[in-house]
Image: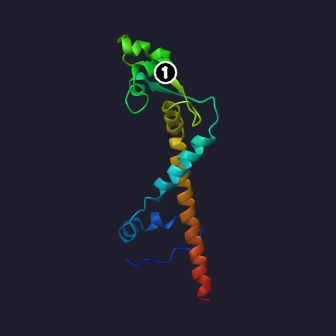
Amino acid sequence: MVLRSWPPCSPLPPFLLYAPITNILHPPQAGIIITARLALISIASLMGSGYFLPISCDQLASRYLIGSREEVLNKFPACEAYFSGINPDQVVTVEASMKGDGVANVRAALNMSFGAALWLGLFIHAVGVEFYVCLSFHIQYLSHR
């Protein structure tokens, strides 16, 4: 199979035209993960107050978030039903803020902005590849003139 050069601004990008060959010659890179992490921190930091995320009391009581029963009950009194056994699936709302007074607030902010960060990273990399392909084609064309 002979590959023709891909013209810039074609309706189909090259990864759709020659997907099997392209994946063998150039395996996909994981740069979107780094871009998404940077966007995640940026979006979570820029997010204002007034956003809340439901988190279960079981997750709040884990050693990774708050830890002790007393600390959870001081910050979230609605978790009393969880600790007493009345409602083991008790959920409370936590304010999503990077400037919050606890790890639960930071977790809520990062969880809320995760989806947007992944979409932004995907968009940046998709547009960046298209710009690179168009520019490299034009530079190659001009250098051989």
* Residue for point 38% across, 65% down: 27
Q: Quadrant of residue 83?
A: top left
* Closer to the camera in the image, 94 or 131: 94
Q: Residues within 10 Å of mark 1 (few under 14, many from 20)?
A: some
* Closer to the camera in the image, 134 or 51: 51
Q: Which residue is mark 1?
A: 92
Q: Residue furthest bottom?
A: 145
Image height of 134 relative to 40, above or below: below
Picture coordinates of residue 140, whole percent (x, y): 57, 82
Picture coordinates of residue 21, whole percent (x, y): 38, 70
Q: Quadrant of the C terminus?
A: bottom right
Picture coordinates of residue 51, whole percent (x, y): 59, 30
* Residue for point 60% across, 73% down: 135
Colour pattern: rainbow
* Residue for point 54% across, 36% down: 109
Q: Is residue 87 visible?
A: no
Q: Look at the numbered disc 1 and give the secondary structure of its residue.
A: strand
Image height of 60 relative to 48, above or below: above
Q: Quadrant of the N terminus?
A: bottom left
51 lies left or right of 90: right
Q: Quadrant of residue 89?
A: top left
Q: Is residue 128 visible?
A: yes
The number of numbered discs placed on residues in the rendered structure image is 1
Picture coordinates of residue 130, whole percent (x, y): 56, 65
Q: Amino acid at mark 1?
A: Val
Image height of 5 relative to 131, above or below: below
